[in-house]
Image (tube, rainbow, N blue to C red):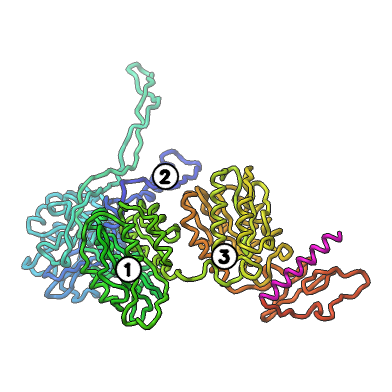
Amino acid sequence: MFLSSSPETPRKKMISCRFVTMDLSSFESICVFLISQALLALGIQQIHVGQEMIGKISAAGQLMQCSASLDVLFLLDGSYSIGKGSFERSKHFAGKLCDALDVHPDRVRVGMIQFSSTPHLEFPLDSYLTKQEVKERIKRTVFRGGSTETGQALKYILHKGFPGGRNSSVPEVLIIISDGKSQGSTAVPAMQVKERHITVFAVGIKFPRWEELQVLASEPPERHLLFAGDAEDAANGLYSTLSDPVCTATAPGCKVESHPCERRTLETVKELAGSYVCWKGSKQPNAVQASLCPFTRWKRVLIKHPSRCFRTVCPDPCDSQPCQNGGTCVPEGLDRYHCLCLLGYGGDIHCAAKLSLECSVDLLFLMDSSAGVTLEGFLRFKAFLKRFLQAVVGQDSPVSVGVAQYDDDIKVPIELGQHKDALSLTKRIDALNFSGGRTLTGRALQYIAQHGFRSSPVFADVQDDLPRVVVLLTDSKSQDSVAEAAKYVKDQNIFLIGIGSSFMRAELTTVTGNPQQTIVYSDPQDLFNRMPELQRKICSVGNPEGCQAQSLDLAFAVDASSGVGLENFLRLRRFVRSSCLHFIINRDITQIALVTYGSKAHTAFALDTHTSSSAVLQAIDQVPFLGDSASAGSALLHVHRDVMTVQKGARPGVNKVVVLLSNGGGMQGAAAPAQQLRHNGILVFVVVIGDADRDTLLRVAGSPNYLVHISSYEDLQYYQGLIIERICEEARSPVNLCKPNPCMNQGVCILGPGSYRCQCHGWEGPHCESRVLRGDSPRSPALPPRSYVQWSPRGLQHLSRALQHSKRQMDQRH
């Protein structure tokens, strides 16, 4: 059987018929045979339900059991029309049905008859006492072959009854497995069998003739007609019918449902193919007459029989969607499941966020309780707050938590540090009531800045100098001004984080003053998915900006082509400018270079050009728009050859990152130079705005971890925090002292333990910086050419500057 979640879509089969010298009828018979085999894939019975329902039907079929007093007799078609292969499938189906039978002399007894030209008793119902014995005997049944005399087999049962059965003292079930192509009449014996109150299931095999099987089956035929092609579905259908009143086959909560289905019969039909000239006799002696004679041919077609199929469906433990935060629910039987959680989740069995607030902060949640947020929204915020605190507040958590709510009025029902454990906090949050007044967010912010962070009396003798954080939860536009109030809050050295739905983005950004300090969600469930993001933002308070004291060489390659356009180029330029504010720029910590490109790349300034933030920012503001077509490949090649080199200010022993900002154009030749950069230990981070082929972008980025694909330039600012975080991860990673190669003039860098040396050819010096004059011996008494160089990162940087100075002097001489 074939289950489908959509209406029938014929599957294309490549069927080839090799032409050899033969008559047309022989060729057609070969093709018809091949087509008939291909049609197996189309499905002889099809239930039109969704994929999820298909899974439920299959699962319920495996779980059903029958322990009633019952006599079950299999009547297997062993004729040549079935063939040995289909006979083996019939045996498999019979064995599968036995899995759900509680075989025992006092409960379910099973017997089998094989029929073809004559019926043959394989084993009576009282032969085997266990399920395993019955299944083993079914496997040993041998195909007999012969004509299909179904009527004779039914008469045998009428005459002999159920061999080894209990003489109608218990319900009798006859399961006929056949293709329904009997060579004799079956209507009368079938009716007589059913008049004896024997329940008859007709199970089709191969390409069954459903009309005859319907005559064999008990009423209503929709519940007694099955297809053996899918054993689990057929078992479900059979036990769904037996569940009332014979078997108690279903578990509590399961129910039998009716679904539209379609059964198909492969029939041979005759059709008119055309006419041909033939010769017929004439009334005149010794004469013939030309005429047109009809030409017919035989054709095999699928005939459809729309029907209903009755199947048992049991409650799925995943129906309630217990897995949170994008987790996948995997059912385990009827009452158990487990969740496959995304990375960063799995704090409990339902994929709660793996969070902890290890940072020491004073944390105050300011929750909107106005009419604009509605009771539903207020309850959602309460649920979010409870779940977040349950995930992050532990017994020894260094964070102090308070909760305030506001509308016209402001209340602080949970003062800062009043409760130290998640249980007491959640109980107090449960007690909060919706008030439903006006939305005066500005007034609430100012009040909290003045009265929300009072030191706890317990620690009155300790100066409370912890970072102070206010998390604003709102989903309603403020009815008073928020800009001045937010400025006042920030002037009190209070860090603001705003949370709201997407339409609140602009107001929340006004409150926080930074898009990176706002969290917006697209739907109610998405709010709960934002808990890890909130945890990161809370614990980023008080940390130095950027990559702290980690040394980094950072180059931006900015698309300035006509495809980007002047307006969007200015947005990219502002993005680079604001990103630079996150780094401490000097010779020892972060160096920044900027490259712009159209069809060609231009260095706006090199790594060693500017030594302060102010100089870098001023230089960025002067970078012009280029126009022209885009070639990201030439830009990355330019960075590789002319930017990330020791001669241009790159420091050995310092991590290096290239951030490519593009609209996705001109990426075709960028993969090779990007790979060259990675080979030299330089991370390539690709940021693309707009439509672009993802496979191409992944080849350039090298990994999905280093690709950010953004829908619009307006949204670029919201990804700055993520990009800076990824850059800083690279800055903290171990450094390969030989990447990029610190050796000049084709010198080979050879790593040692915590050191490296340069192997020079025709040059001398620690980095092969001085040419060996003809006839001279290498001059390096203090540092032989093959000696190891023990450099600290600071020493490498000073040496780099010395090399650059030396190179400038050499250039001036030439």
| Element type where label 1 sits in the image | helix
Q: Is residue 575 above or below residue 495?
A: above
Q: Tell me, for residue 451, which label it has, or none.
A: 1
Question: For the point 72% across and 62% down, which residue is it?
Answer: 648
Image quadrant assignment for residue 165: bottom left
Q: Is residue 757 above or below residue 255?
A: below
Question: For the point 13% across and 52% down, which residue is it?
Answer: 220
From the image, state whether disc 2 or disc 3 is nearer to you: 3
Q: CA distance from mark 2 to mark 3?
A: 74 Å
Cβ–Cβ below 8 Å for labels 1 and 2?
Answer: no
Using the image as rendered, state which of residue 223 and residue 706 is in the foreground: 706
| Element type where label 3 sits in the image | loop
Using the image as rendered, state which of residue 43 and residue 473 is in the foreground: 473
Q: Amino acid at mark 1?
A: His
Q: CA distance from mark 1 to mark 3?
A: 34 Å
Residue 539 placement, left or right of 608: left
Q: Which region shows up in magenta? A: 793-814
Residue found at the very far right of the displayed protein = 775
Instruction: Indicate the quadrant containing the N terminus: top left, top right, bottom left or bottom right.
Output: bottom left
**Mark 2 Cα shell of 10 Å, populated few (<14), some (14-19), many (≥20):** some
Question: For the point 44% across and 57% down, which residue is it?
Answer: 515
What predominant SS class does the magenta segment belong to?
helix
Q: Amino acid at mark 3?
A: Phe
